[in-house]
Image (cartoon, grey):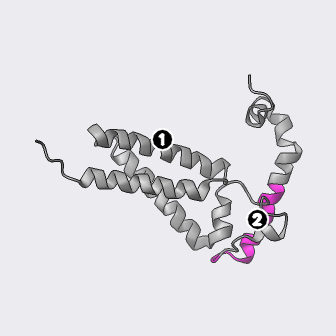
Amino acid sequence: YLPNNRVLDIILNLDNALNSGSESIRWEIINDTLNKIEDSIFFGNYGFYTQYGGPSYFPHNFITVWINYGFLGFVLFFTIVVYMWFFAICNLKKFTGKCFVLFLVFMLVLIFFTISIIVSKHHLYIMFGFTVGVYSQLKHESRTPRIIQ
């Protein structure tokens, strides 16, 4: 039993959820953000939302990356994410032993991070750094020769 579960309520009552006050406000925030992106496409406008509705007035998804860092930052961000997915898919059967466990952790973090990009922003930048860190550790571990004694 999950009392007052917003996500479950949205899933079970999709028609009502799309017309709820919260969803209409989110669409308004997304539209405002897209309009603001048009004003500063390439370089972004970091923290513009604090001028409008306060610190929580931002789209809770990947659009936040574009408004904060501009088109160049947006492209760089998604290039890194796509590269990590490419690495993960190409190396599904490569890792064994300790590296396999680290690869599983990397996959779980990457999946969670990708879902977060789409539906959330609260921990997006922290999760980005964490995901890149796990990726970096996995690359390091996979290149380190093992000494058998």
Residue beneath the point at 76% across and 71% down: 48
Callout 1: helix, strand or loop?
helix
Is 66 included in the stretch rendered in magenta?
no
Residue where numbered disc 2 is placed = 33
**Residue farthest along the left direction in this orientation:** 149
Q: Amino acid at mark 1?
A: Leu
Q: Amino acid at mark 2?
A: Thr
Where's residue 116, x and y in %?
61, 48
Picture quadrant where residue 70 is located: bottom right
Could you say which disc has been placed on residue 140 in the image? Answer: none
Is 38 included in the stretch rendered in magenta?
yes
Please tell me which of labels 2 and 1 falls first in the chain. 2
Q: Is the residue 146 above or below the residue 132 in the image?
A: above
Query: Which of 128/25 is in front?
Result: 128
Horizontal relation, residue 38 to residue 132: left or right: right
Decide: few, some or many residues near mark 1? Use Cα within 10 Å; few <14, some 14-19, many ≥20.
Answer: few
Is residue 96 something one can see in this rendering? Answer: no
Horizontal relation, residue 43 to residue 3: left or right: left
Of badges 2 and 1, nearer the viewer stands 1
Q: Which residues are magenta?
A: 27-43
Could you say which disc has been placed on residue 108 in the image? Answer: 1
Is residue 122 something one can see in this rendering? Answer: yes
Decide: few, some or many residues near mark 2? Use Cα within 10 Å; few <14, some 14-19, many ≥20.
Answer: many
Horizontal relation, residue 50 to residue 111: left or right: right
Q: Give the position of the C terminus as an image quadrant.
A: top left
Where's residue 80, x and y in %?
47, 61
Main SS, magenta region, reads helix
Where's residue 55, x and y in %?
77, 62
Query: Which of 70/5 is in front?
Result: 5
